[in-house]
């Protein structure tokens, strides 16, 4: 079940692989799906990767995010979501080089949590994250000034999603907030509301809204969206004073593609299908799904699902294809009809990994990710607060 046909997706011009060509008018702004399916790399690169990794031995520790392509995952020492991988890196102090096959904010988190003697490497510096890039330090500082002018900054606690830059994590730490993952967002929000009347949730509006409304009993009217591209965030002081959840206008470019039409279409095509989506999806998609959960939850749910069951998964396609291959006794399809990879994650391909490993084996450190000391200090406060959540 590894082909695009068995996953019920078609490699259209909207396939998300290469940036800058075409866009889907049905998706949120910034949710582009150009390109085609990734081609396999030259088989010679496989042997070169093995040889370079063998030369480095225990000096290198390779982390592979769940959304990476299979040819990269093959060389990962561990796989997981972003925070699990950062913690795995911190737990390997003997590794001189941490090669993070993920995106930029993940490598930053690994640098924050690892020791000073360890060097974190990102095989391609262009592997960013569109969601993380939707909130800059300057924009968030301006937002805080808007909250202060509205008289609500003193009663607002920032909660930032792991999928944010080190600068945003540091802002959160400076203002007494915490970081969260998609697995512990509710615990983070409960902690924050014990300390303040409002939460500024950065940078993914959908995770914040879905957690507050779906899991904590808030209403949609309790949520207001702050748009950094509009004067004053596009909200009035009265709206800020009335809101409980102040949501940053950000989203995931992959999960933002899934629509209510996608859910209705798959239900019509596959009777009895279970729709399982990530909480970064839009609220109407989450409301229409049968099951909602983080990447790790999705993997666990499929592992435990009964043979013969049918599942439509609303998350990144590399992971869905891998799950379909791992569970041939179940019908696993991609929720959307068009191929949609995480474009920036897929910049970490086998050629970049081989170049990185061979460079390190030759004594040349490339693409090192370093967070400055002050940013690291305050970002670590926020991350440590998350680790201390009940």
Image (spheres, rainbow, N blue to C red):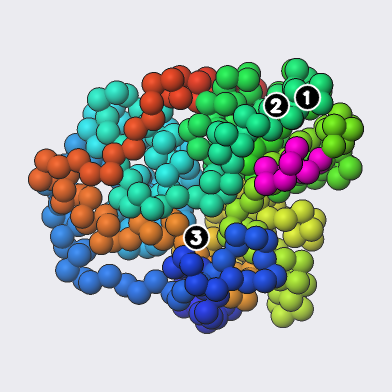
Quote the CA–CA distance across marks 1 and 3: 38 Å
Image quarter of the C terminus? top right
Closer-to-camera residue (179/157) = 157
What kind of element bears circle 3?
A: loop
User: Image check: 372 left or right of 162?
Assistant: left
Residue, x 89% and y 42% (percent of image)? 221
Which residue lies under the disc numbered 1? 149
Residue, x 35% and y 74% (percent of image)? 39
Which residue lies under the disc numbered 3? 342
For residue 234: magenta?
Answer: yes
Quote the CA–CA distance across marks 1 and 2: 6 Å
Which numbered disc, 1 or 3, marks the residue that appears first in the sequence? Answer: 1
User: Image check: 164 left or right of 261?
Assistant: left
Residue range of the region highlighted in magenta in the rendering: 224-235
User: Image check: 288 left or right of 304?
Assistant: right
Closer-to-camera residue (152/376) = 152
Count of picture labels? 3
Q: Name the front one of labels 1 and 3.
A: 1
Q: Name the front one of labels 3 and 2.
A: 2
Quote the CA–CA distance across marks 3 and 2: 34 Å
Which residue lies under the disc numbered 2? 145
- In this view of the protein, can residue 42 be seen by the observer? yes
For residue 33: magenta?
Answer: no
What kind of element bears circle 2?
A: helix
């Amino acid at each position: 079940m590894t082909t695009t046909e068995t996953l019920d997706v078609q490699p259209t011009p909207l396939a998300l692989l290469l940036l800058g060509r075409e866009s889907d008018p049905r998706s949120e702004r910034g949710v582009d799906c150009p390109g085609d399916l990734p081609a396999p790399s030259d088989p010679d690169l496989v042997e070169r990767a093995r040889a370079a990794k063998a030369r480095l031995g225990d000096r290198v520790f390779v982390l592979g995010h769940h959304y990476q392509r299979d040819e990269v995952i093959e060389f990962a020492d561990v796989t997981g979501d972003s925070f699990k991988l950062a913690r795995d890196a911190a737990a390997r102090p003997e590794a001189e080089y941490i090669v993070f096959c993920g995106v930029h904010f993940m490598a930053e988190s690994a640098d924050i949590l690892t020791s000073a003697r360890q060097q974190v490497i990102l095989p391609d510096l262009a592997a960013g994250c569109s969601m993380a890039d939707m909130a800059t330090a300057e924009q968030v500082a301006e937002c805080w000034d808007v909250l202060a002018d509205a008289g609500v900054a003193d009663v607002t606690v920032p909660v930032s999603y792991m999928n944010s830059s080190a600068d945003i994590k540091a802002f959160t730490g400076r203002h007494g907030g915490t970081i969260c993952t998609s697995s512990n967002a509710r615990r983070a929000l409960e902690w924050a509301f014990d300390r303040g009347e409002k939460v500024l949730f950065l940078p993914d509006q959908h995770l914040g809204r879905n957690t507050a409304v779906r899991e904590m009993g808030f209403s949609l009217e309790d949520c207001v969206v702050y748009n950094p591209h509009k004067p004053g965030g596009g909200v009035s002081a009265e709206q800020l004073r009335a809101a409980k959840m102040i949501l940053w206008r950000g989203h995931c470019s992959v999960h933002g593609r899934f629509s209510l039409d996608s859910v209705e279409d798959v239900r019509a095509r596959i009777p009895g299908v279970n729709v399982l989506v990530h909480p970064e999806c839009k609220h109407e998609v989450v409301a229409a799904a049968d099951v909602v959960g983080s990447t790790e939850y999705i993997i666990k749910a499929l592992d435990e699902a009964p043979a013969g069951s049918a599942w439509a998964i609303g998350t990144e396609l590399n992971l869905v294809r891998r799950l379909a291959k791992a569970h041939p006794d179940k019908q696993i399809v991609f929720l959307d009809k068009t191929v949609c990879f995480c474009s920036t994650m897929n910049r970490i391909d086998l050629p970049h990994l081989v170049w990185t490993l061979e460079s390190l084996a030759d004594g040349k450190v490339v693409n090192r990710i370093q967070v400055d000391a002050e940013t690291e200090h305050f970002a670590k406060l926020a991350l440590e607060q998350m680790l201390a959540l009940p």
